Image: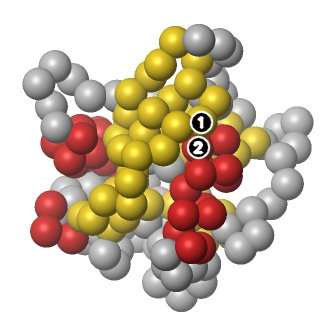
Amino acid sequence: MRDIRVSALVVIHPDRPELLMVRKTGTTSFMLPGGKPEAGETPEDTIIREIAEELGLDLDPARLSSLGEFTAAAANEADHRVIGDVFVYDGVPAGLDLTDIRHQAEIAAAGWFPCAPMPADTVERQFAPLTRDRVVPALAAAGAL
């Protein structure tokens, strides 16, 4: 099994226990926004760059806090596991329209999904194991949901 290192961002809807998730082009799994580091990047640098690329948002680093490092089966790559540095954003990033989430780069769709409980996976739409099995329980244990 090969490892994939990523940084991921938790944004919680201000009015209800829903998470912002994205689906990459050519896939069926929704996951937290984020991605792989470039050479020399810290996990924080990675999440700031990835969110700018995927959602066109400039994150305030002072509003990022680490939820932790989590490991799970990779959603879209067989025989891989993902190791994610997961950050929680305090509030809603400036420029994020809660009703019309703009996405770009390799992102095909973005939206809010309930996390208490998360919807069941279907043939057309699944949720990444990192999000479902690791991050949502950690958020619940931290009292963030």
Question: Is residue 25 in view?
Answer: no
Q: Callout 2: few (<14), some (14-19), or many (20+) C-alpha neighbours within 10 Å?
A: many
Label 2 is placed on what type of residue? Leu
Where is residue 83? Give x, y as percent. Answer: 45, 33
Which element type, helix, strand or loop, lies under badge 2?
helix
Image quadrant holding the C terminus, namely bottom right
Task: Pick the residue in front: 145 or 30.
Answer: 145
Mark 1, residue position: 72
Where is residue 24? Give x, y as percent. Answer: 55, 33
Question: Residue 50 lies in what quarter of the image?
Answer: top left
Image quadrant holding the N terminus, namely top right
Q: Callout 1: few (<14), some (14-19), or many (20+) C-alpha neighbours within 10 Å?
A: some
Q: Is residue 74 above or below residue 15?
A: above
Label 1 is placed on what type of residue? Ala
Q: Is residue 105 above or below residue 38?
A: below
The answer to the question of whether label 1 and label 2 lie on touching residues, with beta carbons closer than 8 A, is yes
Q: Earlier in the sequence, mark 1 or mark 2?
A: 1
Question: Residue 123 lies in what quarter of the image?
Answer: top right
Mark 2, residue position: 130
Whole-number angstrom distance, CA of label 1 to CA of label 2: 5 Å
Which element type, helix, strand or loop, lies under badge 1?
strand
Question: Residue 122 lies in what quarter of the image?
Answer: top right
Name the residue rendered at 34%, 78% in the picture: 91
In the picture as drawn, the residue positioned furthest to the bottom comes out as 15
